Image: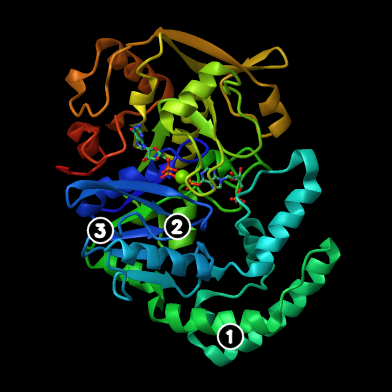
């Protein structure tokens, strides 16, 4: 049984929490796109206290002993960021070895000039900046598509790596000079490359064969999406998107597995909406209420610390994510953040230039012009933190959830009422309809 977990909004929906929660039921957890622009938070109780892990490149299954974590070919890997992440995990007593962390030899590397170019290109866009995480993601994928990239497999051949890095630095410096950016020190890059090679080469392998052979042999695979459907390079609010396919298609190309290997797909979605960076956001609340949701929800980027923009639940976006990914079910998170509100709004359609539509427009300007058509529901104004039985939720919260599910077009397999594993309502019934027989 192989399952894909996908962000259904603009990221930070709580994918890390859900992946960590269900990882014990899978043999392998794999990332398939994005890079260290992702920040997936996992909170676990160890030795009697809460421990927080923010994972950027390493799959959120890593805290579970005995699981194999895979960084797939579709991921862009910043070697330095990965080494820091490994060190931080080890410092917290999590085992990371060449046996439990595999890196695809086909995954492309993020190099220093990608980060310099990300900064320079963003600066040159002025008011229309994407608001990237400045992690070099776009320029690294550009170079991959231009067939000039350096891959993790290159780390396994030190002599070849030196040659490739020297050539790459010369090309990169021509580009950087055009932007007036500081140039790359070729000697330093080669010295760094040799260090990365020494430390990371033991993890590098052909994960395409590994994953296909493992699933053929009956091992189960949990695919962990990064970013989200509305940040997908093809399906998101272009150009205010990331540079990879974060929707389910990316799981096939980014892990090297066929569509038939994915048995079910679950979308993670917040009970409201957030977005970091620029770009259209029809249900955004630029007021005290938006600020109150940000404060209560702790809506600050897990990677960059930037305040997240906040707004009402957008069912136009939810339905689009259900359609594009073929979501079998949703994992709804952060219900508890809405506990204090006296009323709640759900956007069920957009009005764009006087026309009502239930579809996400392809164009960012049209999306910017979209006025939300809202339904209003009464709030429950009581504490739901930590509730793990649906029947214990206040009736009005149950009604809000029922309406969200109806207008989104998918049932809830999980309803999350807090950041910790046990703060979750699990629908065994919905999960079993997805082919998952989990007793979490
Ligand atoms: P991801 O990028 O999709 O993995 O999400 P992030 O980790 O960036 O952001 C989600 C944040 O919400 C993290 O700080 C989580 O610990 C937290 N979180 C997840 N689920 C819940 C929930 O149900 N309630 C509350 N209050 N926090 C949650
Ligand atoms: P997780 O996996 C939220 C956003 C950036 C920017 C746009 C492009 O934690 O949900 P990039 O650096 O990728 O070129 O930036 O995408 N973005 C995210 N927003 N969560 C993320 O990851 C994000 N990764 C990128 O803010 O708007
Ligand atoms: Mg995040």
Q: Is residue 199 above or below residue 354?
A: below
Give me the C-alpha separation between circle 2 and circle 3.
15 Å
Q: Hey, which quadrant is residue 230 in on the image?
A: top right
Secondary structure category for the residue under label 1: helix
- Residue at 50% across, 72% down: 106
| Residue at the spot of label 3 | 220
How many dots with numbers? Answer: 3
Crowding around mark 2 (Cα neighbors within 10 Å: few <14, some 14 to 19, many 20+) is some
Secondary structure category for the residue under label 3: loop
**Any mark on residue 404, and which?**
none
Q: Is residue 159 above or below residue 412?
A: below
Q: Does the beta carbon of the residue at mark 2 sit less than 8 Å from ligand 2?
A: no
Which quadrant: the C terminus? top left
**Any mark on residue 252, and which?**
2
Contact (Cβ within 8 Å) of mark 2 with mark 3: no
Q: Hey, which quadrant is residue 397 in on the image?
A: top left
What colour scheme governs how the chains and residues are painted in the rendered image of this protein? rainbow
**Any mark on residue 161, and which?**
1
| Horizontal side of residue 28 vs 310, given as left or right | left
View extreme (left): residue: 439
Q: Earlier in the sequence, mark 1 or mark 2?
A: 1
- Residue at 19% across, 29% down: 388
Crowding around mark 3 (Cα neighbors within 10 Å: few <14, some 14 to 19, many 20+) is some
Q: Hey, which quadrant is residue 83 in on the image?
A: bottom left
Residue 162 appears in the picture as rendered? yes
Q: Is residue 305 above or below residue 293?
A: below
Residue 256 appears in the picture as rendered? no
Crowding around mark 1 (Cα neighbors within 10 Å: few <14, some 14 to 19, many 20+) is many
């Amino acid at each position: 049984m192989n399952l894909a977990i996908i962000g259904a909004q603009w990221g930070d929906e709580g994918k890390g929490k859900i992946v960590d929660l269900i990882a014990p039921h899978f043999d392998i957890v794999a990332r398939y796109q994005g890079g260290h622009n992702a920040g997936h938070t996992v909170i676990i109780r160890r030795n009697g206290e809460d421990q927080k892990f923010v994972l950027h490149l390493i799959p959120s299954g890593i805290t579970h002993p005995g699981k194999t974590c895979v960084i797939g070919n579709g991921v862009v890997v910043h070697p330095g960021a990965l080494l820091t992440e490994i060190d931080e995990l080890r410092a917290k007593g999590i085992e990371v070895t060449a046996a439990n962390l595999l890196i695809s030899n086909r995954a492309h590397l993020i190099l220093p000039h990608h980060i310099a170019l990300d900064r320079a290109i963003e600066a040159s866009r002025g008011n229309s900046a994407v608001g990237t995480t400045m992690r070099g993601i776009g320029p690294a994928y550009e170079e991959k598509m231009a067939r000039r990239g350096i891959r993790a497999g290159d780390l396994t051949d030190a002599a070849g790596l030196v040659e490739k890095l020297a050539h790459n630095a010369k090309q990169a410096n021509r580009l950087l000079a055009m932007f007036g950016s500081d140039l790359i020190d070729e000697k330093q890059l080669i010295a760094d490359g040799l260090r990365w090679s020494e430390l990371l080469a033991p993890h590098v392998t052909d994960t395409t064969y590994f994953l296909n052979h493992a699933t053929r042999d009956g091992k189960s695979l949990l695919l962990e999406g990064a970013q989200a459907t509305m940040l997908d390079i093809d399906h998101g609010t272009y150009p205010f998107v990331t540079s990879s396919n974060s929707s389910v298609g990316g799981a096939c190309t980014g892990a090297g597995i066929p569509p038939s290997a994915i048995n079910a797909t679950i979308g993670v979605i917040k009970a409201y909406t957030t977005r970091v960076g620029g770009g259209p956001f029809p249900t955004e609340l630029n007021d005290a209420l938006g600020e109150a949701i940000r404060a209560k929800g702790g809506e600050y980027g897990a990677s960059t610390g930037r305040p997240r923009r906040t707004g009402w639940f957008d069912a136009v976006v939810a339905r689009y994510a259900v359609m594009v990914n073929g979501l079998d079910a949703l994992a709804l998170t952060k219900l508890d953040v809405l506990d204090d509100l006296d009323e709640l709004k759900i956007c069920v359609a957009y009005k764009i230039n006087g026309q009502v539509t239930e579809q996400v427009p392809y164009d960012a300007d049209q999306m910017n012009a979209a006025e939300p058509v809202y339904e209003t529901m009464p709030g429950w104004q009581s504490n739901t933190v930590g509730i793990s039985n649906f029947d214990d939720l206040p009736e009005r919260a149950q009604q809000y959830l029922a309406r969200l599910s109806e207008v989104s077009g998918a049932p809830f397999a999980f309803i999350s009422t807090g950041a910790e594993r046990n703060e979750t309502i699990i629908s065994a019934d919905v999960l079993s309809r997805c082919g998952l027989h989990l007793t979490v």
